[in-house]
Structures are given as C-alpha cells and as structure tokens.
Image (cartoon, rainbow, N blue to C red):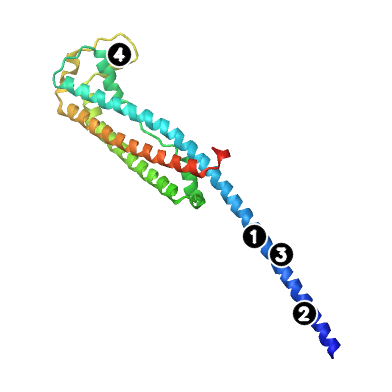
Amino acid sequence: MTRSYSRITRYLLYATGEIILVVIGILIALEVNNRNDARKTHDQEMVYLLKIKEDLVSNNGKLDQFINRQKEYITAAQTIIKHIEGEPITDWHAFNEQCISIYDWRRFYLDNYTFQDLIYSGNLNLISNDSLKTLLLNLDGLYQQYKAKEDHLRFDSETIIFGPAYELLDLHPSFNDHIGQKTELTERMYRDYFQDKRTKNGFLMAIIEFSTMNGMLREMKDLSEKMLRIIEQDLPQNHK
C-alpha cells in the first residue's frame, strides 16, 4: 500500500511538473507573441509618422505660397478700388493683370493622404500620441471650414465680380493684353464697369474673404508646426 501510494505521489509530482512546464512555455510564447505584435505596431506607427511628416513639410511650403499669393490678391483689390474711386490709371497693363489675378484665383488643396488613410483604414489608434491625434483632427476640421469658405467666395465671385465683368466689359481686349498681344485699353472701356456698384462691392468682398482665408491658412501652418515638433520628438534618431 505504501509502495503504491509512493508511486502515485511521484506520478502526481511528475504530472504537476509537466503541467507547470507547459504553462510556463505557453506564457513565454504569449510574451514573445505580444512583444512581436508590439514591435509590429510600433513599426507601423513609425511608418505613418514619417508619412505624416512628409505631408506636413509639403503643406508648409504650399501654405506659405498661398498666403503670399492671396496677399497679392488683397493688394490688387485695394488698388482696383482706388481706381474705381477716381485714382487715375497710368499703367493699363498692370491694372489689367491685377483684375485677372483675382478673376483667376486658385483653390488650396491640403496634402492629407496619410490622414485619410489612417481614418478610412481604422488605423488612427496606431498613433500613440494623443496630442498628435487631436492636432490631426483639428487640422482636418479647419481644412473643411476653409473649403466651405472657398465655395462661398466662388459663389460671391460669380455673382458680384464675374457677373458685372461679363455683362459690361468686352473681355477680348483684356485677354489679348494678358497674353502679350499689343492692345489698347482705355478708361472708356471700363466706365460702365466702374460705375456698377457690384464691381466695387465685389472687390471689397474679395479683400474680406481673402483676409479671412489667409487667417485660416496661418492657423493650419501653426497646427502643422506643432505636429512637426511632436513627430520630431517621437521619431527614433535613425528615422529623422
């Protein structure tokens, strides 16, 4: 009986040891797997951070360009209003180019491919820095507001800038002058256009709209700079 009990005890001890070893092996495997998953997630995050950085650097250059361009639109509109109010035009070609610059204003497009990828792939949570995620969302929200402002400017432009020009001006001489063909532009050609209240109001509206839009672009630039500083801190040295 004692011998049988001893064998059972040894068997139980052996079985318990085997179970413990199996459990330890499973725990080690899980730990290794978790570490591999964490490393893979970290690597994915680093790839996204690098792509976001590329987008932001590209955007900063475009933002500076558009801010300066829209400053020129504002200056042009201010000069045109002075002429409408009676200041003589001494350089008709320069005046024509100022008008055309506002007629031909361009829309701004943000490089946000990486952000869109993060949103639509459901990978935004890969970005571990909550401040960076918040700034990305803020930038996208501000960009959407800016696009709505562009739509508003387009509607107003077609109504009170383009409308009077199409109705009251023969645009062919203006176009010829713009492309370098020798053309005579005179005050008589613009008299009715200047006297229409929509013309002056349209250029006043342009000053207000472009000033507001430039303020929004500066906010975007500020958000971009903040994100670049965060990314520089989060990226490993060999990824910078």
Give residue 17's position: percent from left, percent from top. 75, 73
Helix, strand or loop for disc 3 = helix
How many circles with numbers are drawn on the protein? 4
Residue 25: assigned label: 3
Alpha-carbon span between mark 3 and mark 2: 20 Å
At 21% from the left and 26% from the top, the residue drawn is: 164
Residue nearest the observer in this picture, 145 or 180:
145
Q: Which residue is mark 2?
A: 12
Q: Is residue 12 above or below residue 182?
A: below
Q: Assess disc 3: are there few (<14), some (14-19) or many (≥20) residues with their C-alpha within 10 Å of its C-alpha.
A: few
Helix, strand or loop for disc 4 = helix
At 39% from the left and 43% from the top, the residue drawn is: 139
Q: Is residue 229 above or below residue 42?
A: above
Q: Which residue is mark 4?
A: 177
At 16% from the left and 14% from the top, the residue drawn is: 88
Residue 95: assigned label: none
User: Nearer the N terminus, badge 1 or badge 3?
Assistant: 3
Alpha-carbon span between mark 4 and mark 2: 102 Å
Asked whether disc 4 touches disc 1, contact meaning CB atoms under 8 Å apart, the reply is no
Badge 2 amino acid: Leu
Asked whether disc 4 touches disc 2, contact meaning CB atoms under 8 Å apart, the reply is no
User: Nearer the N terminus, badge 3 or badge 2?
Assistant: 2
Residue nearest the observer in this picture, 183 or 19:
19
Alpha-carbon span between mark 4 and mark 1: 74 Å
Q: Which residue is mark 1?
A: 31
Tell me if residue 105 can be seen: no
Alpha-carbon span between mark 1 and mark 2: 28 Å
